[in-house]
Image: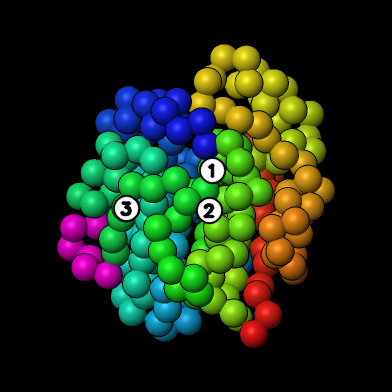
Amino acid sequence: MPTHSVKNQYDRLATVYDRWWHGYVRRSLAVLLDRLDRPPEGRLLDVGCGTGALEKRLAHERPGWRLTGVDLSGEMLSRARRKLRDHPNARFRQASAEALPFPDDHFDRVVSASALHYFEDPATALREMHRVVRPGGRVLVLDWCRDFAAMKLLDAVLRWIDPAHRRCYTLGEARRMFERAGLSVRRATTHRLPWWWHLMLVEAKLQV
């Protein structure tokens, strides 16, 4: 990631993030959760976890899961920890997607929602996700999709005005990045939120 820009921006936004982005977070996570299989137990890593919205949902639905969220912003993580303070199965660490501080084959599921467009080196980030997920595990990445005209325009504007924004990708570009990272894509889909916002979800399952 352009580390200092992302960290500084979200440290500033942390106090208002849940209020401003509640609707988007709820709708976008619904897309991810619809495809995330949830056995009774397991370890899940959320890369770019923000204020812990996904962890909050899963902590209630799957109390047997051990949930880990990483993010660059210490202020966002502080809010996540407060949100999950009554759930000892959830923990949070400040870390970059390109250098995940976990051993190989450690997680059953690795997910990332609305963060890929911030990664300075998405290929390295995906290789790290591949490294820390166990054989038979799954990697799911949800992000903005540049295949649509409105999202192309948004991407161009954000590249001009937002120093934290790296770039959005098309579904084909995302698939190729997965494959270059050694991840075999099982499913890649696009999804439309209300109005003009389009997302893509790319899923990979590691061979046993």
In what quadrant of the picture does the C terminus appear?
bottom right
Q: In the displayed structure, would residue 41 be above or below residue 99?
A: below
Q: Mark 1 points at which residue?
A: 115
What's the distance in space between the residues labelled 1 and 2, CA to CA?
Answer: 6 Å
Label whose residue precedes the other's in the sequence (1 or 3):
3
Identify the secondary structure beneath mark 2: strand
What residue type is disc 2 on? Ser
| Start-end of magenta stretch | 84-89
Viewed as shown, does residue 164 lie left or right of 50?
right
Q: Name the residue under label 3.
A: 93
What residue type is disc 3 on? Arg
> Which residue is rendered at x = 49% and y = 70% of the image?
104
> Which residue is rendered at x = 18% and y = 58% of the image?
85
Identify the secondary structure beneath mark 1: loop
**Which secondary structure is most common in the magenta stretch?**
loop
Location of residue 25 in the rendering, given as x and y in whole percent from the top left corner: 47, 45
> Which residue is rendered at x = 35% and y = 38% of the image?
73
Q: Do the residues labelled 1 and 2 touch (CB within 8 Å)?
A: yes
